[in-house]
Amino acid sequence: MGFVKPVVRLPLRDQIRQTVLDGLISGRWGPGDRVVERRMAAELGVSQAPVREALRELEALRLVESSPHKGARIRRLTAADLREIYEVRAGLEETAVRLRHPPVEALRVHLAGLRQAAATASVADQVRHGVAFHREIVEASGNDVLLAVWESLGIEVWTHLSIRLFRMRPCENAADHEPLVAAFERGDPDVGVLLRDHILGYAPLD
């Protein structure tokens, strides 16, 4: 008799945060829009406390800003905001590669996902597989602190926003990742530099 895998429920705060992130990605909320705690709490059937906690976490991600007596609003994101995220991310992933290289076969699985997503023109799947590809690189470093910092950047939502607000070429993602896989496969000593340049190539120009 097999064991039933337990259902893992995210904390309420995390569920609310994801609801806001999904709204940002889908365009439900745009730059400057107010996110009213009371209204969101009523809509989700929860108290205002977890909504407030979720908004604070999003403020730390620089996606939301709040001010006294005005509440929370979606930040007006600039190309410079996004470029700073990509610069930090590039440094983290270059460091990860210097610590340890990822398994090439795992990268190939994500590359195949990118190709399939490109063939079906699914932006959501392209972002999902692209983020998974890069998470594989960071996780392979074996450095939990580095991974935690990388995760804290909110890579997936920033990737969606960079595509929606500043650049529209997600169909090139698979081709962009192929040279990286080839470099890891041949043990290229400059793969860290190649990876850094690859990431910065997605950053919008100021």
Image (cartoon, rainbow, N blue to C red):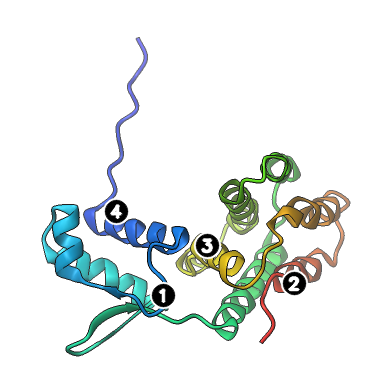
- Relative image position of residue 74 (x, y in whole percent): 37, 76
How far apart are the two marked residues, 3 and 4, measured between alpha carbons? Answer: 22 Å
Q: Which comes sooner in the sequence, label 1 or label 2?
A: 1
How far apart are the two marked residues, 4 and 2, measured between alpha carbons? Answer: 32 Å
> Does the CB distance between marks 4 and 1 fall below 8 Å?
no
Q: In this rendering, would 77 be left or right of 53?
A: right
Q: Residues within 10 Å of mark 2 (few under 14, many from 20)?
A: few
| Residue furthest out toward the left | 47
Q: Which comes sooner in the sequence, label 3 or label 1?
A: 1
Q: In this rendering, would 166 be left or right of 38?
A: right
Q: Secondary structure at mark 2?
A: loop
Residue, disc 1: 63
- Relative image position of residue 99 (x, y in whole percent): 68, 64
Residue sitting at 38 percent across and 62 percent down?
28
Residue, disc 4: 15
Residue, disc 2: 201
Residue sitting at 18 percent across and 56 percent down?
43
Under mark 1, the amino acid is Leu
Under mark 2, the amino acid is Gly
Q: Which comes sooner in the sequence, label 4 or label 2?
A: 4
Circle number at residue 185: none
Question: In the picture shown, does residue 140 fall above or below 6?
Answer: below
Q: Secondary structure at mark 3?
A: helix
